[in-house]
Image (cartoon, rainbow, N blue to C red):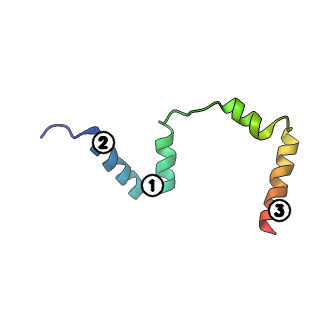
């Protein structure tokens, strides 16, 4: 019996990882080997603009309080 097709090996490996680690940890594991995409700096700037770290933390706290209210 020769080597199995890579797609089959990948499918079986993900099934085993999911069973043993759970879906979330399997995704975390697989994502380490997946190259990122896009422009992190441009995306960060469009989301945060010129906000300081203190402003970002205050916004996170405000948002958390609103969700928990």
Asked whether, in this view, residue 10 is left or right of residue 60, the answer is left
* Residue at 85% from the left image edge and 56% from the top image edge: 62
Instruction: Examine the image and state in which quarter residue 63 appears.
Output: bottom right
Q: Position of residue 38 (x, y in %)?
A: 60, 32
Q: How far apart are labels 3 and 2 at the CA level?
A: 46 Å
Q: Residue at x 40, y 51 (%)?
A: 17
- The residue at the point 31 percent across, 49 percent down is 12
- Which of pointers 1 and 3 indicates the residue nearer the eye? 3
Q: Is residue 6 above or below residue 60?
A: above
* Cα gap from disc 2 to disc 1, whole angstroms: 21 Å
Mark 3 residue element: helix
Mark number, residue 31? none
Residue 7 image point, x, y percent: 30, 42
Badge count? 3
Where in the figure is residue 33, as x and y percent of width and height? 47, 36
Identity of the residue drawn at 84% across and 50% down: 59
Instruction: From the image, tell me which residue sits under label 2.
Output: 7
Q: Seen in the image, is 24 located left or right of residue 64?
A: left
Mark 1 and mark 3 residues within 8 Å of each other at the beta carbon: no
Q: Which residue in the protein does label 3 denote?
A: 65
Furthest-bottom residue in this view: 69
Q: Against 26, is 34 above or below?
A: above
Image quadrant holding the C terminus, namely bottom right
Foreground pick, 69 / 1:
69
Q: Helix, strand or loop at disc 2? A: helix
Q: Quadrant of the N terminus?
A: top left
Q: Give the SS element for disc 1.
A: helix
When the figure is inspected, residue 12 is found, relative to residue 19, above or below; the finding is: above
The image's mark for residue 21 is: 1
């Amino acid at each position: 019996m020769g080597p199995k097709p890579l797609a089959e090996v990948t499918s079986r490996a993900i099934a085993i990882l999911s069973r043993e680690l759970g879906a979330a940890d399997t995704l975390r594991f697989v994502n380490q080997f997946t190259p990122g995409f896009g422009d992190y700096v441009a995306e960060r700037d469009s989301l945060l603009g010129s906000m300081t770290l203190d402003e970002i933390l205050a916004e996170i706290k405000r948002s958390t309080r609103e969700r928990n209210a």
